[in-house]
Image: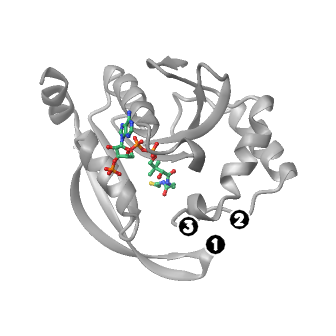
Amino acid sequence: MQIETSRLRLRRFLPCDITDFAAYRSDREIARYQNWDFPLSLASARRLVGEYSRRDPTRPGWFPYAVELKHEERLIGDVAVHRNPGGLEAEVGFSIARDQQGRGYASEAVLGVLGELFTQGLRTATAECDVRNTRSARLLEHLGFTYVRQHSVFVRGKQERTELSQFTLPAERWETLAQQ
Ligand SMILES: CC(C)(COP(=O)(O)OP(=O)(O)OC[C@H]1O[C@@H](n2cnc3c(N)ncnc32)[C@H](O)[C@@H]1OP(=O)(O)O)[C@@H](O)C(=O)NCCC(=O)NCCS
């Protein structure tokens, strides 16, 4: 399941990731449009990393890939993949630590994961982000996703109602883009 890109290694979460994972998950900027517990204590990070490390990436449900910066051998973020039963459709989500943003790492990591998923027979990749999360929307459109619609949700962790934008990337479009 390990994926190598030029600068990154996308792999299972490991115990050595706990401190870096807790740090970026506890960054208010990173958490702003995410539906997760905030801040994340070291104890909760340890529990989550333990749980992630036992998940099977081929089964339906969420599998978070740890994004490791190869030359520093340290965690800088994650790309989470939610496979639907049957494996034909999957949603992706992503986070990169603030001090590592703006260097193309999220683009490289998500492209690496999508390449693996489409090679395995995925037909449609999807993604969602808060309508105010313009950086994520831009990233998705740069990668070839197209905007579909927006819908309203109640985010329990934040006790607020917001609008999410939905994006899609069908395999045919992925293949066309890969040939360009
Ligand atoms: C959205 C997010 C993942 C982007 O991470 P990132 O690593 O900064 O993304 P990239 O570097 O690939 O792209 C960001 C910008 O850097 C630019 N860039 C790309 N490659 C670059 C490179 N090699 N050098 C410098 N800049 C580069 C991109 O063009 C992009 O520019 P733009 O914002 O003006 O369009 C990050 O901001 C984040 O973690 N946000 C919080 C979590 C979140 O909301 N996730 C979404 C939930 S779905």
Q: Is residue 12 visible?
A: yes
Find disc 3 in the rendering and name its residue: 32
**Which-is-in-front pick, marks 1 and 3?**
3
Image x and y of residue 133, in percent:
40, 64
Is residue 150 toward the left or the right of residue 50 in the image? left
Query: Along the line of sight, which residue is nearer the eye, 123 or 178?
Result: 178
**Which-is-in-front pick, marks 1 and 2?**
2
Is residue 109 toward the left or the right of residue 95 in the image? left
The secondary structure type at the circle numbered 2 is loop
Q: Amino acid at mark 1?
A: Gly
Task: Report if the beta carbon of the residue with label 3 is closer than 8 angstroms to ligand 1.
Answer: yes
Find disc 1 in the rendering and name its residue: 157
Going from N to C along the chain, the mark reached first, 3 or 2, is 3
Going from N to C along the chain, the mark reached first, 1 or 2, is 2
Mark 1 vs mark 2, CA separation in Å: 8 Å
Residue 5 occupies quadrant: top left
Is residue 74 toward the left or the right of residue 98 in the image? right
Residue 53 occupies quadrant: top right
Find disc 2 in the rendering and name its residue: 38
